[in-house]
Each structure stands twice: as structure tokens, then as C-alpha cells.
Amino acid sequence: MPYDQSLDVATFKETKEFQDTRITVGVFSYNGGAKKLQVSRENRNQDEEWRFAKLGRMTKEEAKEIIPIMAKALETM
């Protein structure tokens, strides 16, 4: 069965912007299933548009900003 976006419910979502990147922390439940934490990155391209990018690693500055958001997200799970 293919992915159906209408079945993916966000119960928490917060985004933190940095210079040319932003990181979003969310809690999602697909089709009434278990709540799961998602962390994703988007980078701004030359046209000032946001594009999804593999999160991979975070700088110390990013981690300091994102960890408290992750803690808030955990409270909703």
C-alpha cells in the first residue's frame, strides 16, 4: 500500500531557522499508529527556495538549539 499523506498526523511540529538551513522537529502518527519523532533539514538554494536535505550531522550551535525542541516533542509522545 503506498504512502498516503492524509493518514500522517502531526501532533507536534517546530522549526528552527539558521543562516541558510532550517531544522524541523516533529511528532507524527501514521494511520493511528505509534507516535514517532522526526528530525529533518531543509537548505535554502540560490533561488531562496527550501529544499529537503539529509540531516546527517548537526553543528554544535544547531544541536544546542534543537535538543530543547526535541525534549518538548518527547513530552507530547
Image: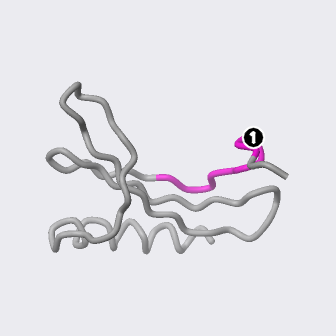
Packing grade of label 1 (10 A; few <14, some 14-19, many >=20) is: few
Highlighted range, magenta: 4-13
Q: Amino acid at mark 1?
A: Ser
* Quadrant of res 66: bottom left
Q: Which residue is mark 1?
A: 6
Q: Position of residue 41 (x, y in %)?
A: 36, 54
What's the residue at 59%, 67% (across, down)?
A: 76
- Residue found at the very far top of the displayed protein: 47
What's the residue at 33%, 69% (across, down)?
A: 56
- Of residues 40 and 28, the one nearer the viewer is 40
Q: Relative to residue 64, is residue 36 drawn left or right?
A: right
* Quadrant of res 48: top left
What's the residue at 81%, 56% (across, down)?
A: 31
Task: Give the vertical position of 42 relative to 38 (above or below).
Answer: above
Q: Relative to residue 51, is residue 11 drawn left or right?
A: right
- Residue found at the very far front of the displayed protein: 1
